[in-house]
Image (spheres, helix red, strand yellow):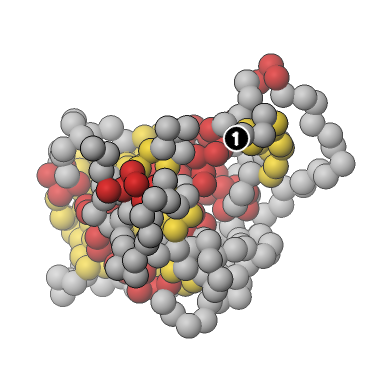
Amino acid sequence: MPPLRWYLAQGLIPLTEDSSDDDEGPYQLADGRLVCGLHGLVVCGKCCVDYSFMDDNHVRDEDELPELDNDHVYFPQDSDYEDMYGRRTRRGTGQVFPTKFVPPNDSVKPTELFTLEKRFNGFDKRYTLQDDRGTVLVHTDGACLNNGQPNPKAGWAFSLGLRPSGNPLVYSGRLEQKGPFGQDGSQTSNRAELRAIIAALRSSNWPEEGVHTLVIATDSEYAVEGSTRWVKKWIKDDWKKYIYERGRGGRRREDVKNRDLWEALLGEMERCDDQDMIVKLWRIPREWNCLVDAAAKEAAGAEHAPETWEDPIIFHG
């Protein structure tokens, strides 16, 4: 007999107010789509998940793509906003991409590979790779209440280690109404996931801490696969993608979602490369990311979202 989530995914069992996929995780339908385990929804506001990014993989082969028109040329430019280190938000062009962090095996937890160690200021502790103090781990997460529904509210969070008091060094915030380059941005979990990674990258001048490799742990497949694989094709195809319309026998071309955040993330990759620092993304189970998951959801619950893009102010020591 199929599991309960299969019947829910087919719409054969009515949903209840207490339904949640927190323990079940996603379920894959016969056509390859992912839906939340207990609601059967591609975009589920109750569970704060959005699996619509899987449609990004339904693109035609390169030799099938027609010539793109140049009616809407998108001229790259950096933002005028400067962070606490005097750095502007940089629009990346795809010169540098992050790679995936590969642990010894899938069951190894971050705390088994990384141990707490005091860093450059002598106060805060960072999670440092055993036998290589130049490799540091941070955790990130994003969440959205009412995701894909009326009045969505998104939040992000990242963790840098421990304060001198022993309390977690966690920063979080509501997702801004505008993106890094001034465009209006929607409140979604996918945007919040990317925002968290960008915030973590910009939270320190990492090379000054002696960091040559920054490992970012996240439970977001969208962020990991998107930044290490899919974005390469999106750039090549001028940030367009072809979507199969199931059941209709046709295809349509549309803009890649969240282009501004993808470009901001790639800009941080290029900045890190300029400083001889490598960035790796490690996709971990949600239960290993509970600290920042809770912080992101709490941040999403804030009443008002900032209008403009701002980096968090980081206090060391």
Please state which of residues 193 and 34 is positioned toward the viewer in this rendering.
34
Question: Residue 164's quadrant in the figure?
Answer: bottom left
Which residue has dot 1 on it? 246
Could you tell me if residue 198 is visible in this image?
no
Residue at horizontal 42%, vertical 42%? 34
Could you tell me if residue 129 is visible in this image?
yes
Residue 222 picture location, percent across and down: 45, 45
Residue 26 picture location, percent across and down: 35, 46
Please state which of residues 192 and 246 is positioned toward the viewer in this rendering.
246
Quadrant for the N terminus in the image: top left
Q: Is residue 269 left or right of residue 291?
A: right
Residue 192, placed above or below residue 71: below
How many residues crowd mark 1 within 10 Å: few (<14), some (14–19), many (20+)?
few
Q: Is residue 301 left or right of residue 64?
A: left
> Given the image, on which type of amino acid does mark 1 rest?
Arg
Residue 309 picture location, percent across and down: 57, 68
Residue at horizontal 49%, vertical 71%? 153
Question: Residue 93's quadrant in the figure?
Answer: top right
Residue 62 picture location, percent across and down: 65, 20
Quadrant for the C terminus in the image: bottom left
| Secondary structure of residue under mark 1 | loop
Residue at horizontal 27%, vertical 39%? 2
Q: How many marks?
A: 1
Residue at horizontal 18%, vertical 31%? 105
Give the residue furthest to the right.
71
